[in-house]
Image (cartoon, helix red, strand yellow):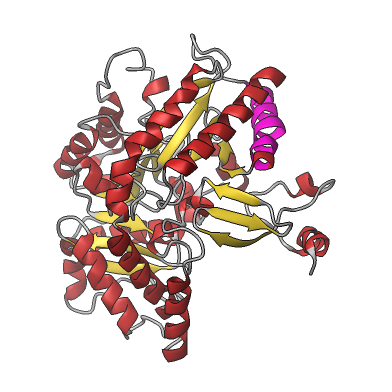
Amino acid sequence: MNTEELSESAKRHLWMHFTRMSSYADHEVPVMVRGQGPYVYDSKGKRYLDGLAGLFVVQVGHGRTELAEAAAKQASELAYFPLWSYAHQPAVELADRLAAIAPGDINRVFFTTGGSEAVESAWKLARQYFKLIGKPEKTKVISRNLSYHGTTFGALSLTGLPGIKTPFEPLVPGAIKVQNTNHYRCVDCAMLDQCNLACADDIEQRIEFEGPETIAAVYLEPVQNAGGCFTPAPGYFQRVREICDKYDILLVSDEVITAFGRLGYWFGAQKYGYQPDIITCAKGLTSGYSPIGAMLASDRLMEPFLKEQNSFLHGITFAGHPVSAAVALANLDIFERDQLLDHVRGKEGEFRAKLETLTDLDIVGEIRGTGFFYGIELVKDKSTRETFNDDESERLLRGILTPKLFELGLICRADDRGDPVVQLSPPLVCDSEQFDEMVSILREAFEAAQAAL
């Protein structure tokens, strides 16, 4: 198909995810055809800086032929075999490698095909685990306001974004929400010099209210994505760990986005110095070259399943797919060979400093994040932190910024699932040249938005 035919066929047949299909009634659907390093190219040959790494995914950059070769080699040897009562070599080797880099006693790897399934698997594991050890009432889970944990029914129930949940209610009962770590807008500490950890204490208060004997797990992202890259205050995760230990509750670190170098470490839990009981991950494990996800669990969670006739009554046909596992192993090789973790840690200061130059603009309220993962919150009044109403946000993000950024050749996320933000999560191979390019485009787009508003 030529460019026009591709776009028309997409309108006619392709149901795009989280997309207002009506928005393409009067213009073409952009069609990406290839990528190289931190850039992608559309069917017309236009180049874009992939400032979102696809969808927080393409850690090692586009066009890595060694990953394609790893997939082809594995497919020619053993294209598929399930992990139901059998093992295959790529899954065994990948599980071994993940156990080696995971923190503490997290040594058990349950594969999935993506992040939502990993999150769902963790909730199912928590429920069955507590039943097996004689605490069957522990079924509820706690997560944070505005958090995003996935789209399957369990993961969606954990998600703290009402707008994407309402169409599918009633959801799974027992998913409880607590404060997030948005210091910029926190009612308890926004005007203080530092966080007072009221957001962590809120977890204990909800546990006490619901009854500790009913709570199975607390789900937290090291850096919360939805709402715009909320980072934790010093001591936050240590306090949460104390609370979970006090009430015999599992701490789940949802690292679908933050694992595999996004924050400069294999896992965000390592950056912030806390020990989870479960880690959920996906996305960057293969850098998007093949779909895979995983739930990593501590040894103690496996213990009841090693007795008598017990088994974890859960499985997914394509989980731990041989081709995906082989690609993941090759992807981890690239991480080590190219020292990508060191690169992110070495460059995050420069990346942030260049983003901070945008704070002279009236529309830029706060820049927050860490590693190669940042959110820029946009405000109506900088001095009062007044945000935009729904109509203004719609015009700002979808009427002005999204088309302008795309026109200027930057792919990023303009999002108003909380207050309006622009998010950046570029491939980990980006360097000074790409930082400058992102900031230059953002400045032009933000200035256009200020003038239009």
Residue 403: give x, y in percent of width and height: 70, 38
- The image quarter containing residue 134 is bottom left
Is residue 391 found inside the magenta-colored segment of the image?
yes
Residue with the most extreme bottom position: 77
Q: Quadrant of the C terminus?
A: top right
Segment tinted magenta in the rendering: 389-406
Is residue 416 found inside the magenta-colored segment of the image?
no
- The image quarter containing residue 96 is bottom left
What residue is rendered at 42% in x and 59% in y?
Answer: 60
Q: Quadrant of the N terminus?
A: bottom right
Q: How many labels does the image show?
A: 0
**Relative horizontal placement of residue 435, taking residue 401 as reference (left or right):** left
Q: Compared to 422, does 256 lie above or below?
A: below
**Relative horizontal placement of residue 78, taking residue 208 as reference (left or right):** right
Secondary structure mostly seen in magenta is helix
Which one is in front, 325 or 178? 325
Which one is in front, 242 or 247? 242
